[in-house]
Amino acid sequence: MMRVSCKTLIRAAGIIAAAYGMMACGIPGPSTPVEAMASLRRTLALNGGSNGAEPIMISYLAAGDSTAPRLILIHGTPGTAVGWADFLADPPPGVEVVALDRPGFGESGPDGAMTTLDGQADAVAALLPEDRPSILLGHSMGGPVAALAAARYPERVRSLILLAASLDPALEVVHPLQRVGDWAPVRAVLPRMIRNANAELLDLKPQLEALRAELPLIRCPVLIVHGTRDDLVPFSNTAYAATNLTGACLVETIALEGADHFLPWDAVAVVRAAIARAEEMRC
């Protein structure tokens, strides 16, 4: 029988084995109890668009000073807003912290996957205040979502943090297990989070190819933070990002020697330092 590593199962995320493999692999998470987030829960209706579609309900968590610049935390795939619980329970100084359940995850609609970066970025854009600046922080697949929102709304985004972000389409390879997970009989019995994560990953390469043309539209300072031993999103994404962020007024890269992919939980102090740096970055 073929041996498949836990990390391969997580990346494939497309069959029942992947779902239960994730549970068995001891994937890190926040130290703050999830139950502590209940009082921070908010919702908003995201317009379904001009085609008459029903509004999509977006669920998010908010903490900190509601008059300060807003820090929007965007999770990867699979994931939910409560993955940022440590940053919500103890908000970094000088910001309001908002973490959303991306469309298709957690308590946000729709039930199925929203695989387009356009749709995901629209959900982030709905949380951008008009009266104060925002800092966007996207982890893993949340990175390209944050990047597209920054490109589309440059007047509202003060700075952008790309944390172990997937950006280079050449590095996206579909694992055979993902195709199995997309078969209707298998898909029907998968947990929603895994089913929708698999759908996102299957469509990610063309989505990143389309994003390439928009990356030069980002004007704000960009901080790239990535572990050199990231087995899920290769470190070489940093070079791709730096090459294509030609319109950004400032780009800094922090290479975390020996660090893995799970920076929001394995490198909390580093992420907090990155947020502080993003607050002070100016052009």
Image (tube, helix red, strand yellow):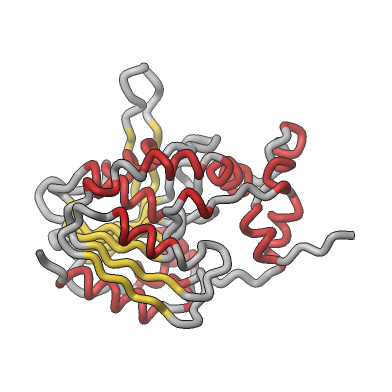
Q: Nearer the viewer, residue 105 or 259?
A: 259
**Quadrant the C terminus occupies:** bottom left
Q: Nearer the viewer, residue 92 or 40?
A: 92
Count the numbered circles shown.
0
Going 33% across and 52% down the picture, which residue do you hit? 146
- 119 vs 160, left or right, is right
Question: In which quarter of the view is residue 275 placed?
Answer: bottom left
Residue 251's spot in the image, x, y percent? 23, 65
- 82 vs 21, left or right, is left
Residue 83's spot in the image, x, y percent? 46, 63
Going 42% across and 79% down the picture, which residue do you hit? 256
Going 15% across and 60% down the picture, which residue do you hit? 249
Q: Is residue 52 above or below residue 250?
A: above
Q: Is residue 188 above or below residue 264?
A: above
Residue reaching furthest to the right: 1
Going 69% across and 55% down the picture, which residue do you hit? 19
Q: Please say whether residue 117 is visible from this viewpoint.
A: yes
Q: Please say whether residue 32 is visible from this viewpoint.
A: no
**Quadrant the N terminus occupies:** bottom right
Question: In which quarter of the view is residue 139 placed?
Answer: bottom left
Residue 96's spot in the image, x, y percent? 22, 63
